[in-house]
Amino acid sequence: MSASTAVHHSRPQNRVGAQGLQAGGQPGGPAARPPRLRLTRRGRIVLIGLPLVLLAALLLSLTGLLNSPAKAADAAGGLSVTQTVSVTVQPGESLWAIAGSVDPARDPRDVIADIVQLNNLENGKVMPGQQLFVPSK
């Protein structure tokens, strides 16, 4: 081989710093600590915000459970029956007029609320010829 065609084989050299080599040939020494975990702003929001949202949902569901409406009576003896009569709506007659004629001693708004509830009326409008159940005195 001539000097110009000589091939130089070199081995990569391991550079060892002041810390020495760890077991397995890794730099850092035996007392090296893992890198500190760094969270981004989004990571902090997820780490803190997600448990807070779940806690709020749990509290709201428990609040709804504890504040639920009263249940119906267990026995039929605890129920009261509302006495009703059937009335046919005349042309030009309104719920206000019907409530006033059925029970003039009560507030018409209360009687109208009872009529709406008894007949499952959605908008409080009645048509001539319509049959309504109204509470009797």
Image (cartoon, rainbow, N blue to C red):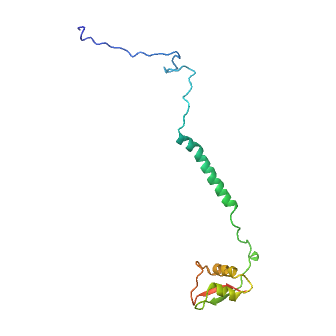
Identify the residue shown where x is 58% and y is 88%.
130
Above or below — where is 135 with respect to 32?
below
Residue 112 quadrant:
bottom right
The total of numbered circles placed on residues is: 0
Above or below — where is 61 with respect to 34?
below
Residue 121 quadrant:
bottom right
Left of 137 or right of it: where is 115?
left
Residue 119 quadrant:
bottom right
Left of 12 or right of it: where is 19?
right
Identify the residue shown where x is 65% and y is 87%.
97
Q: Position of residue 124 (x, y in %)?
A: 60, 80
Name the quarter where the N terminus is drawn.
top left
Q: Which one is nearer the viewer's eye here, 73 or 98?
A: 98
Q: Position of residue 103 (x, y in %)?
A: 72, 86
Identify the residue shown where x is 57% and y is 42%.
47
Name the quarter where the C terminus is drawn.
bottom right
The residue sitting at the bottom extreme is: 90
Q: Position of residue 25 (x, y in %)?
A: 48, 19
Identify the residue shown where x is 63% and y is 80%.
116
The residue sitting at the right extreme is: 77
